[in-house]
Amino acid sequence: MIRKHLKKFVAAALCLTVLMAAQSNPFAAASDSYKDEINDLNDRISALRQEQQAIQSEIDKTKNDKAKKEKEKKELQNQVYLAQQEIELLSERIGLLENNIEKQQREIEEKQAEIDEYYEIFKQRMRAMYLNDDATTLGLVFGADSYADFLTRTEMLQRTSEHDKKMIDEMLDAKHAMEEALAEIQENKAQVEQDQSALSDQKANLNQKVQEVAKQEMQLADLQKEFEAQKAQKLQEEKEAQAEIDRIYRENESIGDYVGGDFIWPVSGYRTITSYYGWRFGGSDFHTGIDIAGRNSAGQAIFQKPILAANAGKVIYASNSYTPGRGYGRYVIIDHGGGMSTLYGHQNQVYVSVGDYVEQGDVIGEVGTTGWSTGPHLHFEIRENGKHVNPKKYFPGI
């Protein structure tokens, strides 16, 4: 029993020695500096993202078709630049995290080596003490000169043991805290790498959008050039197209009350508008709807993509024949009751016939470039009592 107490005392003393050797925490100063750098990078990344949001807000504010495309192209290029800067900052943050992880791993290994070394010393001393019975607890306690001295030594051993236990607990807490910090850094590193991958995808998408905007701008410019070159003819063709639509409405009675509900977007996944409702080409031509074009988030072009009925109703016009370069090409008109109707122009194929009843979301055709069009898109109109209105009234977000 005495030898058992001696072993506990010696083990506690050795642990105290180990703890005092590691008392100066090498992680504290380095951690503070590292966290300051990370916080600075986080602030800079946050500022970049706010700037990108501000740019997007400016894009959303522009209204004029050609000016919008030119401004959107410029702002998208700015977003590409900011995205690249953000990627560089994230790369820098990843580097800091990796360096800190490596440093902590090295320091953990060094401390483990120290602990192993002291443990070997402890085993050697315990072996020596076992072979030499002179160094016993009796020599430490019962060697007291008096009863008072005995009590003093006993109290000293007890206090030393309690102090050593407290210090050992602190050492273990520090070790656990270090391990938790390392786990947190590794988790942050994984998150940053995920963000970097997402931003790389974003940069690729932005580059693609810039190219698409440039292409759309060229299409709009070509359309304007063609209109200006044949202005009188195009104005006459537009007049004839509107007269035809007026005739269609006169010859078809409405199905009754409005079917109800909100309209849905007619081409799922495609939100780019290349020409808005209203005057264009310097006030020479009034656009009676919106042109939906571009690519979806997966990079797929809109050509031959399904056109959806914006609401339930009756097909009152469906044309599969057309004159190249004139009017709406292949187009469909759906009556939704209550004087509400929608028109879908420039279709590649029409899947419905006059008299068909369709449900909201039914596929009525596919996007094309028939009629007066310089590229694949859907010309979409909403009409009230046969008169075209701005679709923004029903889709405020466009």
Image (tube, grey):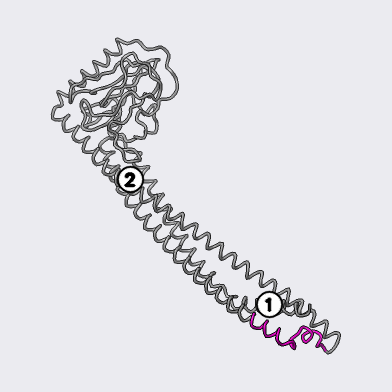
Q: Which residues are magenta?
A: 122-144
Measuring from the top left, give residue 307's x and y in whole percent: 33, 27
Mark 1–mark 2 CB contact (< 8 Å): no
Q: Main secondary structure of the magenta part?
A: helix
Residue 11's label in the rendered image is 1
Considering depth in this image, is 372 or 62 the residue closer to the camera? Answer: 372
Q: Is residue 318 above or below residue 130?
A: above
Element class at badge 1: helix
Measuring from the top left, give residue 151's x and y in whole percent: 83, 81
Residue, disc 2 = 205
Measuring from the top left, give residue 35's x and y in whole percent: 49, 63
Choose top left, top right, bottom left or bottom right for residue 350: top left
Residue 136 located within the stretch drawn in magenta = yes
Element class at badge 2: helix
Considering depth in this image, is 293 or 349 the residue closer to the camera? Answer: 349
Label 1: few (<14), some or many (≥20) within 10 Å?
A: some
Q: Amino acid at mark 2?
A: Asn
